[in-house]
């Protein structure tokens, strides 16, 4: 008589409600504000450039700047400063690289989630950073080794909120986008993942509303997230 097959662990109820019996064959993570606290680094760099040029931002600018590309941020700042965009781009790059040199912090739960997910399925990272910067940030954060695929603003024709990056990452991981899960903190990235056809977990940055997603979590330390991944 053969031994009984071990029963599969049950997913937490709210994940069952959101995803049913669906499980991903690949996972694509955002980077900034989700895995690494680079939003703080970027904000310091941006504040320095804003102050240096005497820029006065509008309340609506904050929404557009959150999760945007370097180019979009430069366009907004340049328009407010009546300054050449390339000057602002150069200033933002310089200040961001300088701030990165002071160190980088992982978001709570990021390392554990990436390690556990990576033990189950192949991982990608999709970021509106330029590729060289994304690679450097993940190296500094100690996470680079876990990602098989990196997609960035300069690896696709259209960065987030266009779906190009997430679609490209899923296919590079060998799956259809509908078989992949995305994790995002911003509406810009969430829209990109949704439009590409990925299922989506939203983990909004503190002080920001949760983007529309299959399920929203307060942070990556949520024990139900670990329990769900353990069922894959």
Image (cartoon, helix red, strand yellow):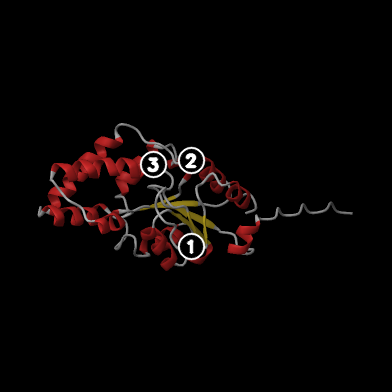
The residue tagged 3 is 37
* Location of residue 106 by image quarter: top left
- The residue drawn where x is 40% and y is 61% is 168
Q: Residue furthest top?
A: 102
Q: Residues within 10 Å of mark 2 (few under 14, many from 20)?
A: some
Q: Looking at the figure, which quarter contains the N terminus?
A: bottom right
* Location of residue 82 by image quarter: bottom left
Q: How many marks?
A: 3
| Residue 3 on image: x %, y % | 84, 51
| Residue 223 on image: x %, y % | 60, 46
What is the C-alpha distance between the residues marked 1 and 2? 21 Å
**Do the CB atoms of the residues marked 1 and 2 lie less than 8 Å apart?**
no
- Judge whether 137 appears above or below 183 on screen: above
Which of the marked residues, 3 or 1, is nearer the chain's N terminus? 3
The residue tagged 1 is 213
Side of 79 relative to 155 (left or right) = left
Side of 176 relative to 49 (left or right) = right
What is the C-alpha distance between the residues marked 2 and 3? 9 Å
The residue tagged 2 is 108
């Amino acid at each position: 008589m053969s031994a009984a097959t071990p029963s599969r662990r049950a997913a937490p109820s709210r994940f069952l409600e959101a995803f049913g019996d669906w499980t991903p064959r690949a996972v694509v993570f955002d980077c900034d504000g989700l895995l690494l606290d680079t939003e703080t680094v970027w904000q310091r760099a941006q504040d320095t450039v804003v102050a240096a040029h005497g820029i006065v931002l509008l309340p609506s600018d904050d929404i557009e700047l959150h999760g945007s590309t370097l180019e979009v941020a430069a366009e907004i700042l340049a328009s407010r400063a009546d300054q050449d965009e390339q000057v602002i781009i150069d200033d933002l790059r310089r200040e961001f690289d300088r701030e990165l040199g002071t160190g980088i912090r992982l978001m709570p739960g990021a390392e554990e989630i990436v390690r556990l997910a990576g033990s189950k399925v192949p991982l990608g990272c999709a970021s509106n950073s330029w590729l060289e910067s994304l690679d450097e940030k993940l190296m500094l954060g100690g996470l680079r080794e876990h990602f098989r695929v990196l997609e960035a603003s300069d690896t696709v024709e259209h960065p987030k909120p266009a779906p190009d990056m997430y679609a490209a990452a899923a296919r590079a991981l060998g799956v259809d986008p509908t078989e992949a899960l995305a994790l995002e903190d911003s509406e810009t990235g969430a829209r990109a993942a949704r439009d590409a056809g990925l299922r989506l977990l939203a983990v909004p940055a503190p002080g920001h509303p949760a983007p529309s997603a299959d399920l929203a979590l307060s942070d990556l330390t949520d024990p139900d997230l670990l329990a769900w991944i353990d069922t894959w």
